[in-house]
Image (tube, helix red, strand yellow):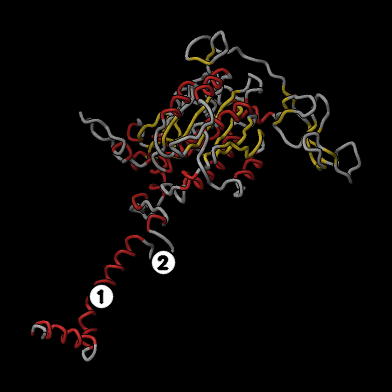
Amino acid sequence: MARPEDDTESEEEQDADWEPRAGARRARTGPKQTAAQKKHKTKATAYASKDGAGYSWEEEYKRSWDVLREDESGSLESAVNQLIANKRRRVVRDTTSIQRGIIRHLCLIIDVSLAMTDRDLRPNRLDMSLAYAKEFVSEFFDQNPISQLCILITKDAVAERLSGLSGNPLDHHKALSNKAKLTPSGEPSLQNSLEMARATLAHLPTHGSREVLVIFGSLTTCDPDDINKTLENLEKDRMRVSMVGLAAEVKICKEICKRTQGQYGVILNEHHFKELLFEAISPPPIAKSNSNGNSTSGGKAQGASLIQMGFPNKITHDDHQVDSSTHSFCACHSKLQPTGFICPRCGAKNCEIPTNCCVCGLTIVSSPHLARSYRHLFPVGNWTEENAHSLPHKSVKCFGCDKEVQASKASPIPEKTNNPVTPAATTTASPTTNVYHCPRCKNVFCYDCDLYHEQLGICPGCC
């Protein structure tokens, strides 16, 4: 039976497309290939980097609105000072003189679970946490030289000790650089971590604070038992637990921090992460205790304790009693060391200070260590910021550096309105034209001297 005429013509057209009219076929498919290539190119641009190294969200994070811009004179000084002034307005130091523990024992716990591989922080949560942890260790021992710190990690539902309780920041930096132990895997165990921290700090003397700082990036915890029992033991041992959450607020974490009088915060971005972490550098107020010894929000404060401390003599192999060509063994590591510190009580040689003597247990420190720790008990007050236009004279000299501040360069004071003042409106004036008054000595200082006074912890006019 013959096929319909229309079907024959359709078949002939298909044969013509494949055999004799190959050029026409290419002409017909050309626009389709161009459209497909264009679509593929658009998709690659949206999801991958230009050099093909990875996805666009894996590229370096750029904040285009924070780019420094030159002023009318072509200088970047005003832009840099503006950024510093904005940060200074956000951070207001607590200058109240309260009882604080200057001898601190801190246990830093870092989550190394699979949740730390998320890339919402650059390059990921774990790498940023380790970088901030190294900065935290350096700043912690700079502000608290007679304190001690240890580092724990949690992964695969267990807790591991990364570094022991020590006052040497180099040991902790070396431990944080050990990539073999810092490979993320499994789930964290908050209970095991807190139990290990409690076992590390529970036997320490009561004159030193017992603190735990947790960097927690997971929303779950794999615990072997009821974590509320661990919380009761933490309260009994008067341990303060603070946490920094990287994902979202977790109820049990908030409850632990609340009952142990710690602080709990969830980060917003990278800068907020560092601010929350560095809040633990300053010594916290001493927790009040009841008659049973448990820390509570009321009751009588803990009584002061007298602590014996010794100031050692630093020696080298030239000054030592033995031959100058030989080294001597230290009491802490039993290693030959060319230098060391001699305990004033028993005469044992220690490698570093501050530390506790391995033989007699005496706390060995130096006078600069005590001075840097003592400043937390009586912090210097914040200076009052004032625009140069409000001064009675057109120019005034800084009491600290004798630098003249011209009032003519300052921006005029905005008129008073009924509208509330926003933080953005308060940062329009250049910080270089503002002056700062000490509320105690009433002297006037410039912006640079204000930064120095915060770092040194003293007022040039009061001392």
Q: Residues within 10 Å of mark 2 (few under 14, many from 20)?
A: few
Q: Residue at x 52, y 18 (%)?
A: 98
Q: Residue at x 89, y 46 (%)?
A: 325
Q: Amino acid at mark 2?
A: Asp
Residue 106 in picture, x, y percent from top left:
59, 30
Q: Taking the image as drawn, is residue 460 in sight?
A: no
Side of 179 relative to 402 (left or right): right
Residue 95 in picture, x, y percent from top left:
48, 24
* Residue furthest right in the image: 323
Viewer-closest of 217 and 176:
217
Question: In the picture, which quadrant includes the N terminus?
Answer: bottom left
Q: Can you tell which quarter of the image residue 27 is in? A: bottom left
Q: Which mark is residue 51?
A: 2
Disc 2 or 1, which lies upstream in sequence?
Answer: 1
Question: In the picture, which quadrant includes the C terminus?
Answer: top right
Q: Can you tell which quarter of the image residue 366 is in? A: top right
Measured Cα–Cα span from mark 2 to mark 1:
22 Å
Q: Is residue 442 above or below residue 328?
A: above
* Residue furthest top in the image: 291
- Mark 2 near mark 1, Cβ–Cβ under 8 Å? no
Residue 164 in picture, x, y percent from top left:
66, 35
Q: Which residue is mark 1?
A: 34
Mark 1, secondary structure of its residue: helix
Which-is-in-front pick, marks 2 and 1?
1
Q: Is residue 84 above or below residue 382?
A: below
Mark 2, secondary structure of its residue: loop
Q: Which mark is residue 366?
A: none
* Residue furthest bottom in the image: 20
Q: Residues within 10 Å of mark 1 (few under 14, many from 20)?
A: few
Q: Can you tell which quarter of the image residue 107 is in? A: top right
* Residue furthest left in the image: 5
